[in-house]
Image (cartoon, helix red, strand yellow):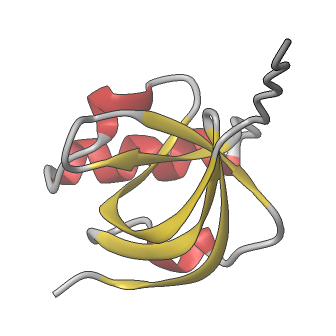
Amino acid sequence: MIASLTAASAAAGSLTGWISDASCGASNASAEKSARDCAERCIKSGAPAVFVSDADHKVYKIAGNTKVMDHLQHKVQVTGEVKGDTITIKEIKKAD
């Protein structure tokens, strides 16, 4: 008899997308000034920041202490580790 155990998958790599707020998620993931301003207002008011992948609009919770507030007005490239619906960001920078 062969037993198989599966662990939560973890993928490390780089993703491009937007920092948004948990309240609006993917709907604020664009270059529109109103979306950027709304995400900033909501995060400053206490809504958790999230990362929204540009490729598939998947919303990820952000783990760890990152400087997302410095990147609310532009698209970002994040490097880190994804586990389920959470990304631990190791590096964040303005996307090209």
Q: Position of residue 49 (x, y in %)?
A: 62, 47
Q: Identify the residue at image location x=76%, y=29%.
A: 6
Q: Identify the residue at image location x=46%, y=73%.
A: 78
Quarter of the rendering containing residue 64: bottom right
Seen in the picture, residue 33 relative to 58 is either above or below; the reply is: below
Q: Position of residue 38 (x, y in %)?
A: 40, 41
Q: Position of residue 12 (x, y in %)?
A: 55, 67
Quadrant of the frame with the N terminus: top right
Spot the residue most to the front.
1
Q: In the shown orientation, is residue 41 left or right of residue 76?
A: right
Q: Position of residue 80 (x, y in %)?
A: 59, 71
Seen in the picture, residue 13 relative to 11 is either above or below; the reply is: below
Quadrant of the frame with the C terminus: bottom left
Nearest the viewer among 24 and 78 is: 78
Q: Identify the residue at image location x=27%, y=35%.
A: 57
Seen in the picture, residue 1 relative to 70 is either above or below; the reply is: above
Nearest the viewer among 41 and 72 is: 72
